[in-house]
Image (cartoon, coloured by chain):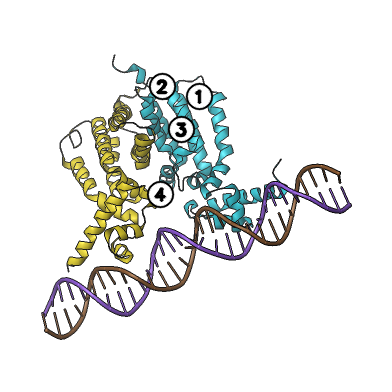
Chain colours: A cyan, B yellow, C purple, D brown
DNA sequence: TGATCATCTGGACAACGTGTCCAGTTCTTG
DNA sequence: CAAGAACTGGACACGTTGTCCAGATGATCA
């Protein structure tokens, strides 16, 4: 049994209305009622598919995140396999900055309530970066992976981008340097 | 005009009750009403001094943070002045891990609502770390400082400590390695 | 085409947290 | 001890959440 036509139509209305609302104002202040009203449907209609506003944002982010993940596992280097770990981490950082620059309101909206560690996307990035750390010879990848991912928290990007006024390119450059510093010479440590 | 005796007494009751509540359950679920009830005072009495539950947590954290800050600016090396920037950053990381280990519930409680970037303590740490980055020859300290502080977000520590089960020492070791990787050889870059 | 039935819809409801207000009380000052 | 300032705590109005159910709508099948 496929989704009913009216249900599919309303789902689209809800998603589009939510995208607009998240972009227009502080994503943390968007309520289920706001989304329902903007979409022209009842509140229960929104609740039927999404338990929270964060879930709506996650749904909107999903396709973009999936595209990035595919490039990470099967795309061309340096983002995909083939390049040295330090270069791949730098490319990953750069791709994440692009993603945050394009969809920051959604990324912020996806964080309201539960932590980002619970999302499926975070798990994928974690797996990817952990592999890079291990390949580079980092002593304890399990302890470092979340530290390496921490600078990509949407709230950190928002702070740098808007409170501080830094350009996305400047942030990306800083992250690239850190990627090479963290993984560039690990195997050449004292021995 | 000094604080009235009964007001001071109630302030202490509120702070002690809040400390207990934050430690007992998820700090994000503690409400002003809970604090008032546990302290044995009315809700408006709590509102008189603290606008939000986060403000209560900040007040409780304040003295501990101040102690750390004094050690940073005037204490013995490697945390205080005198040691190389990489060693000082490593010492700072280690001190922050200790602080988080001892007062994680308060740190998490202080984050509910507004972002941690707005707190005065964050500004002090930022200033300190920015100075270390500049002294180490990092090209763009303003862009890197918040990235270097990001792994210390209470939510990241909570994830590593409880979701992953890592020991505080293991996290501190990983951070020390990163500190040396990020600042250890910056001035010895290609030339 | 028209009947049947599962699904969807949207307004209503109760519960909860927030922030404010003010009348009564308590403490400090002279 | 009197007068005034400050504090207290219950009450109030508001907004959000999450659930529920009776009516409406669309898919299926004869």
Pointers 4 and 1 in contact (C-beta within 8 Å): no
Q: Would you name the residue on which mark 2 appears? A: A134
Circle 2 Cα neighbour tier, 10 Å, few/some/many (<14 / 14–19 / ≥20): some
Chain for disc number 3: A
Q: Which type of secondary structure does the marked residue at label 3 adopt?
A: helix
Residue labelled with disc 1: A78
Say whether disc 1 or disc 2 marks the residue closer to the N-terminus.
1
**Residue positioned 51% across, 35% down in the render:** A121
Q: Are marks 3 and 2 on the same chain?
A: yes
Q: Are the residues flagged by discs 1 and 3 in contact, CB closer than 8 Å? A: no
Q: Earlier in the sequence, mark 4 or mark 1?
A: 1
Upstream in sequence: badge 4 or badge 3: 3
Real-space Cα distance between discs 4 and 1?
31 Å
Mark 4 — on which chain does it sit? A
Residue that mark 3 sits on: A93
Q: Position of residue A184 (x, y in %)?
A: 38, 22
Spot occupied by residue B3 in the image (x, y as percentages of width and height): 19, 66
Q: Seen in the image, is B18 located left or right of residue B1?
A: right
Per the model, the C-alpha gap separating discs 1 and 3 is: 11 Å
């Amino acid at each position: 049994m496929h989704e009913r036509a009216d249900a599919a139509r309303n789902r689209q209305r809800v998603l589009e209305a939510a995208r607009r609302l998240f972009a227009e104002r502080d994503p943390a202040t968007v309520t289920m009622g706001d989304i329902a009203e903007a979409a022209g449907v009842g509140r229960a209609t929104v609740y039927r598919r999404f338990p929270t506003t964060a879930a709506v944002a996650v749904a909107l982010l999903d396709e973009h995140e999936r595209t990035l993940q595919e490039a990470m596992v099967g795309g061309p280097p340096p983002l995909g396999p083939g390049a040295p770990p330090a270069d791949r981490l730098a490319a990953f950082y750069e791709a994440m900055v692009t993603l945050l620059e394009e969809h920051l309101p959604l990324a912020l909206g996806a964080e309201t309530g539960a932590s980002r560690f619970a999302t499926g996307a975070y798990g994928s990035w974690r797996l990817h970066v952990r592999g890079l750390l291990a390949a580079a010879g980092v002593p304890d990848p399990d302890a470092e992976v979340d530290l390496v991912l921490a600078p990509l928290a949407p709230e950190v990007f928002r702070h740098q981008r808007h409170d501080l006024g830094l350009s996305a390119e400047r942030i990306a450059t800083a992250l690239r340097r850190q990627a090479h510093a963290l993984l560039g010479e690990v195997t050449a440590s004292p021995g």
